[in-house]
Image: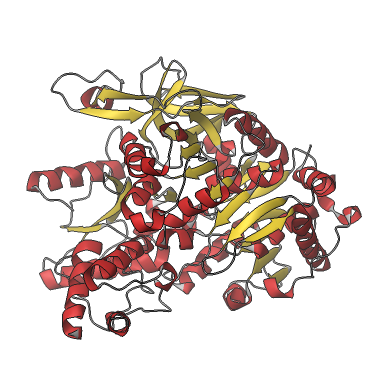
Amino acid sequence: MLTFSDFLKQHYERNPAQVSVFILHGGRPDRPVTYRELMFGAMGYVRTYQKNGIQPGEVVILILQHGIDLLYAYFGAILCGAIPSIMPFLTEKLLPERYHTDLAALVNVTKPTAIVTYPEFEPDVHAVVKPGEDSIKAVIVSNQVDNPSEPDFAVFGGLQRKPEDIVLLQHSSGTTGLQKGVALSHQAVINQLKDYSEVIKMQPDDVFVSWLPLYHDMGLIACWLMPILLGRPLVIMSPFEWIRAPYRLLQAVSRYKGTLSWLPNFAFNFCAQKIRERDLEGVDLSSWRAISNCSEPMRWDSLQAFYERFKKQGLHQEALVTCYAMAENVFAVTQGGMNGPVDYEDIDRDSLQIEKVAGPAMLNKPYVRMLGAGKPIPNTTVRILDARGHPLPDRAVGEVVLKSDCMLTGYYHRQDATEKAITNGWYLTGDFGYLVDGELYITGRKKDLIIVSGKNIFPQDLEQLAYEVPGIHAGRASAFGVFNDITGTEDVVLVAEVETSDIIERQKITEDVRTSITRGSAVALRYVHLVDTHWLVKTSSGKTARSANREKFLNEMQAKGQKF
Amino acid sequence: MSQEILNQLSQYIGCELLKQPDRVIQPDEALLSSGMIDSFHLVDLGLFIEEKFGIRIDDFELSASTFDTLNQLVALIESRR
């Protein structure tokens, strides 16, 4: 199996009647899609792509929600030899103009030759595309695609792709993320699928159940490519539907005897808190064998809360496992809890934060409960480096770097970003952590990245939006995340300097900042803190200005005894 | 009756969802399409309405197409009582 198309061809030839995906939509019957149907539907897209002159190696942007169109469009692109990239879908709160700006930025850097979307969204795409000026050859509308038809392997450019060729691009959302696409090769993804399926002990009766977004590595790799290419059923629902009714995930696991799922930390808290007993009637979770906590900082409390809430429904404690992953390694870097309970340890907080050493918790002193992320998957090596790039011993905190057989080819058309991120073949993750006998613990982030509900948010994107508000000057705002114990994820805080001390004016500015950021990024700000001029820390030794501002903000809140 | 429902909703949304107890929400202000109420809060809103007013809102009804303002939400609640 050298390329994705080889996997698909084999399933079509050997097990065409096997259901590959069950698509769940609220209010409609579940829709099973066999490998035969998948290939027939993908063939329709292959014909459409080729009629529009899309060549192997060209990028196709998919602006589609979870559903049959996305399934056919994605694998149609693969079979063509084109490079699919799923764009985060416009939510009802994002200002169309902002979405247009983000899409334009993506088109400008990535230079795709086709965009596929729904008829309702076609005008928005045309508002961005400049025929003759940019790279776009075609805007393809989902209801104007060739009908499903028998696959013609002779025309599949995908079968001529080489293992080292790029197979897909993966982006974080937002202006910054959309200009930094992670380019992955067939070989890298196939290596990850092989190594990772071994680590999670994939079995013939495994069933994947997921609501995860597909523009993010966890959803795309673990809960889309892995089951579909490796031949296990995938039960999939939209994140928009899950968030309104989190019980849907558990009901689906029960109905389909789901065995594997991946969830960001906040989802454990969210499910534990927001699911009514009534919605769990008849739900049996005993089939669930590995629920991997992944994509944002993991908390032991979150796993515990989830277990306590659902053990009555047959949930096994051993099913709660951990994972540290990133698109730059295709997906998983480490996996924990597969050969015994997940590791956790209580660490003295001052030792960790001040001396940067994970020393044991001491009597009557504050401590932090660290949850282990597990050991590296086969063919992935992890090291901890100090600020000068030298390896550190166990328990010393430093930057996590990795080397593997499933690394990114680079950031697409971003030589600058690629060179900054890879040194001597090692990828610099920008995360801080420590090792103990091969077990990795993540302690924090070097980058100023904010992660909310498993989603990466670049603070500069939020600050730019704040600068558009009258009363806030460019450079005079700072955005950062603060962990919230109840939700199990970060709250987003923005501090901005203003000249006025008038309460009414400040209230208006606060409202405007919230609106600007929500409408411009779909991020909900937890707290807007307006301060006098000269409050913001500009430069600071050893840490970024944002983390210094964060510290200052937290100290002020604590001093005032203020919760926010 | 509906003024009372309106006030209770406004207070719940301001205090519990937005964490802004002083926030006054206008009866015709866009709640969902503006992003004021985040998708993570929809489940909470549904639970509150069920517990407080005894009426069930299905999860696919928790969208701007079913109600987007306090006025519309009050009308929905009253129609089901």
Q: Is residue A99 left or right of residue A69?
A: left
Q: Quadrant of residue A398?
A: top left
Residue A419 location, x and y as percent? 57, 37
Does residue A131 sit above or below A16 in this rendering?
below
Q: Quadrant of the N terminus of chain A?
A: top right
Pick whichever, A428 or A155, lies toward us. Answer: A155
Q: Which residue is most to the front?
A: A282
Which residue is rendered at x = 37% and y = 47% of the image?
A266
Q: Is residue A56 visible?
A: no
> How many labels, in total?
0
Colouring mode (rainbow / by chain / secondary structure / one colour): secondary structure
On the question of residue A252 being in view, the answer is yes
Residue A77 drawn at (x, y percent): 74, 57
Tell me where residue A369 sits by quadrant.
Answer: top left
Q: Residue at x 41, y 27 (%)?
A: A342
Q: Nearer the viewer, residue A531 or A320?
A: A320
The residue most toward the left is A560
Residue at the spot 31% in from the left edge and 51% down from the top edge: A273
Q: Horizontally, is A74 left or right of A303 in the view?
A: right
Q: Residue at x 47, y 46 (%)?
A: A284
Percent position of residue A540, x then y: 27, 38
